[in-house]
Image (cartoon, rainbow, N blue to C red):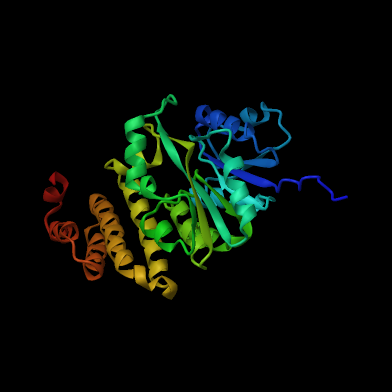
Amino acid sequence: MSDSTPAPQPLVSVVIPTYNRSDYLRDAIASALSQTYTNIEVIVTDDCSPNSPKDLVKAFHDPRLRFLQNERNLGITLNITNGFEAATGKYVASLNDDDVWTPEFLAKLVPKLEANPALSVAFCDHYIIDAIGTVDKIATEENSQRWQRNQLLEGVYQPFWQLALVDQAVSCAAAAVIRKESIDWNELRTAGEKGMGRHWDYFLGYLACRDGHGACFCPEKLTQYRVHSQNITVVTNRKNNTTKINSGFSRVYCYERYLADTRLQKLWPYFREQLAVGQTTMGIGLLRDGKASQARSYFWQALKQHFNVRAAAALALSFMPVAVINRV
């Protein structure tokens, strides 16, 4: 007689990086612990928040929940890397501290990875919600169109270089499950040590796809991505020099790495164009900080990569008197 006992579920490590957002963090943790896929550990890694969420985490009284706290602020990339390195699961999944998953998120995605060892990632589409958790139907549809997930057929894509690095349809920050052994986590740590900021998830997508592994797409919306006043994308889009410089640096770091990878040679024209965007963004941030000569070098680099009017105009502006620059 054959043994009909089902195979045990592999352990999935859910990593929730957080910094000073206790109200939203509570909802994120609750959505992770409420997964119908139950063999999980949830690692909350706090980047030295002024108001520690330690008591909030303890209040769940769930043995699957672990809390890590940095002794000093390390930045998002090193904070999330700490969580990934502490993970003991076969698979890892990141959940932003202001986002939430639907109860079936892991149950829908983990079996895709279990069924195909050649996959490094399983990912899905997601909703857009506002500060109080209400789904924005128009923004959700626009978001799916922006990343072309509305045109993406369910199934396996291998390799998925175009999907991850050009279309940027794979959201490793909140809408993907990753085979842990497929990633060189030391490279993510190195990126953080060199100053990688908001684009850590984009770089993680590179680490997942570069060796030619596959990704499986599930068209269901299994994640709710929250847009609010302190959301990192919103903050970066404001006229804030620090966030603009950090965003520009992250872009530059990513695209310089991609341009050094001969396996991705077909995508180099796109990478050069985007590297120029990052260099221009960084230069504008420096120009606003009054560092015209430093900014100028980035504008020159951008124009060498890919001519664009924005970089040319900023370069011309950098030679003008400070009073004129400030007015512009």
Say above or below: 113 vs 258.
above
For the residue pair 280 and 261, the one nearer the viewer reads as 261
- Horizontal relation, residue 197 to residue 71: left or right: left
Residue 284 position within the rendered picture, expressed as x and y whole percent measured from the top left: 24, 53
Which residue is located at x 42 percent, y 52 percent? 199
For the residue pair 253 and 63, the one nearer the viewer reads as 63
- Horizontal relation, residue 91 to residue 231: left or right: right
Does residue 156 show up?
yes
For the residue pair 8 and 180, the one nearer the viewer reads as 8
Residue 11 position within the rendered picture, expressed as x and y whole percent measured from the top left: 70, 47
Does residue 75 show up?
no
Q: Residue furthest bottom?
A: 262
Which residue is located at x 28 percent, y 54 percent? 281
Residue 131 position within the rendered picture, expressed as x and y whole percent measured from the top left: 41, 27
Residue 206 position within the rendered picture, expressed as x and y whole percent measured from the top left: 47, 61
- Horizontal relation, residue 86 to residue 231: left or right: right
